[in-house]
Amino acid sequence: MPTAHAPPATVAPLFTTARWISDPAFAKAPLRPLLRKNYAPVTTIPHNDALSNRHVLVRGTCTLEKPPATALLAITADDYYHLWINGVFVGMGPAAGYPHKYFCNEWSVGPLLQPGLNVIAVQVYYQGLVNRVWYSGDHRQGLIAELRAGATVLAATDARWRFTLGQAYTALGTAGYATNYLERFDSRVHPVAWRTKGFDDRAWQPMQVRDDDDHTLVRQPTPPLHVYTIFPKVIETIPGGLRLDFGSELTGNLSLRARGPSGAVVTLGFGEELRADGSVRSDMRCNCTYREEWILSSKDDELEQFDYKGFRYCEIMAPEGVVLDRSSACVRARHYRLDAERFSWSSSHAGFDAIMQLCLRTLRFGAQDSILDCPTREKGPYLGDHTISGLAHLYASGDLPYARKGMADFADSAVICPGLMADAPCAFMQEIADYSLQWPTLLLRYYQHSGDLATLQELLPVLQGLMDHFAAFRRADGLLTDVLDKWNIVDWPANLRDDYDFELTDPPKPGIHNVLNAFYLAALRDANAVAAILKLPAFGDEARLRDAYRAAFYRPAVNLFADTPTSQHCALQSNVMALYAGAAPAAAVPAIVALIRAKRFSCGVYMAFFLLKALAVAKEWSLIWELLNDQGEHSWNNMLREGATTTFEAWGKDQKWNTSLCHPWACAPLPVLIEDIIGLAPGQPGWSTIAFTPHIPKELTHFALRLRVASGEILVEHRQGATMIKAPNQVAVITP
């Protein structure tokens, strides 16, 4: 299968003698072609549901006379693995990938090796659902692993590796949008010691070598997830069990020890909120019902959940005769590492500090191997979300490889449609036009922050394909019309579109409307900027498109932009996007600002980012700060009033029918603070020089910001009206 672009030059062969091995049951299952356009027919090859939710426990061994001090284990599995060496947990992976670009991890495991027999234990999971999490449901399953010390192969997957089915894991239905199976873990049939070298696996079956495997394997460009233990802040004894409060939203799975009669069922309820009576609301408002079970064996049992959830509270209910070890209750948390030493913020403004902490906590737990839509209902990345959450995470982490991977993951979907998919890489085929048109901005932004010219050159064919795809929908004046192959979102939820006067159906109806064309204008602007950097011809005439946009949507009588060429309705979104895309004439700017001042955040949290950035175009710094600290029902302060520990999908819990309470697309305050209030920007690509244009409000009498950029650490301190900046290179101070 062809790739959307060549793999990075750093990718070298990962395996020399290892073979791809699988559960033999999958050898008889025909591969299911899942890559398709959003509205194209679904594959007619049925899925073998007997293979769904399949846990396979795999063991490989090697005998070492003198273990090397350093050794690397290269490994991947489809869909996912947990890895142990000699009974010690190593980690999990890989990041989701299409078969034509499937990620592999490398683990440094030298200290875990012992003289004599060594056991590599891998729990391989095939989910079998078509969703936003993995590229699953395709009948591809198995793993490949190779342990090396330098050039010497110490162990490699082959037909001698043995497996058994993990019968302890059965399903209690699914949660979210068929996002994950709810688990019933049965300690009676779980081989507790299977990961250790003393375990007898002679009754296990050999794995099957698959010379027909078609994965194209590449090194994962980012490190594996950070996995660690979080203990509850409060453990409350309740009739029949325990209630745990971990203090804030987190992502992970529960670990607990208990003893009770064989067959006794412990029920587990997880939630983000408590009900009025103090019980845990496990039928969460985000469309996930997290109720699971644990069956005891009469021994000292330990709960071993596999998949993760997003939650704050847990309610554990046990029948009479069961003893729960409350001291063992904890969560094995998992997320992409966000190092506290790379970013810090403190100020004289306690209210805004609370908002910043809300964003930082969201970016911590909402970032798995990709920045997620949410860690509950979808558990997958979305391109439009990435415009906001990816930028916020880049500032909070300084992690350029993570930013590049997020952008490149969507580029890899070009094999499905040159116009790119809305969520990638995964098996759920969804296309959103206004999301796709934000990809050129991601590409340009990555270059500005990294100075990585090679990536611009490498991804140029993807950019060309994207622009060519949308060019096919242009009418004579260059505006997009009848874009029928992708949905349009404009803003979300639909009830916060300010009565946008264009019917947004899925599939879409023919016609032309404002916001999609504003995103197209911004896409052309940023694509042309990339072309100029590469000294190539422009992708199109931006001035001509701007003129056509004004002719179609601008209403001089009110100095505002209408939603369609024939409408007189001027929604907030239409005017925010006109200003953001650089299409508003000078006469319109005061009117648009007045509209924003009057309507404030009468839009979704998603559009709020573009609203704030549009105000930056208008140099309305005081209004930006005012809105960041707004106290109304549509504000970050409203989230805090409603008990948020991470940012919500909507402004309030009840403002959407299925509100996620951990949604990274609501992290706009963090990048807006840095770029538009403090005024930091790369002066040259890669931050080789730093532009500093402060717009400090009087309410911030003092603050301290520390962040990591490509060229090093930047420290900005403001006190008694004076602002000081320390940076690793030249700073250009621009007087506002």
Image (spheres, helix red, strand yellow):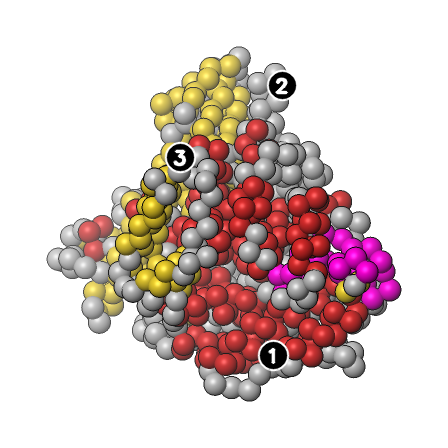
Circle 3 packing at 10 Å, graded few (<14), some (14-19), many (20+), is: some
| Vertical position of residue 323 compared to residue 217: above or below | above
Residue extent of the magenta highlight: 557-581
Pick the front one: 690 or 69: 690
Gap between marks 3 and 1 measured at Cα: 48 Å
575 in magenta: yes
Could you say which quadrant of the image residue 637 lies in? top right
| Vertical position of residue 610 compared to residue 194: above or below | below
Q: Earlier in the sequence, mark 1 or mark 2?
A: 2
**Residue at the spot 22% in from the left edge and 71% down from the top edge:** 151
Q: Which residue, given by chain and number where applicable, does mark 3 sit on?
A: 348
**Residue at the spot 66% in from the left edge and 64% down from the top edge:** 586
Could you say which quadrant of the image residue 76 lies in? bottom left
**Residue at the spot 64% in from the left edge and 81% down from the top edge:** 541
- Asked whether disc 1 touches disc 2, contact meaning CB atoms under 8 Å apart, the reply is no
Q: Quadrant of the N terminus?
A: bottom right
| Vertical position of residue 408 compared to residue 173: above or below | below
The amino acid sitting under disc 2 is Ala
Pick the front one: 141 or 609: 609
Q: Which mark is residue 276?
A: 2
**Residue at the spot 74% in from the left edge and 74% down from the top edge:** 548
Q: Which mark is residue 293?
A: none
SS type, badge 2: loop
The amino acid sitting under disc 3 is Ser
Determine if residue 436 is in view.
no
Q: Which residue, given by chain and number where applicable, does mark 1 sit on?
A: 465
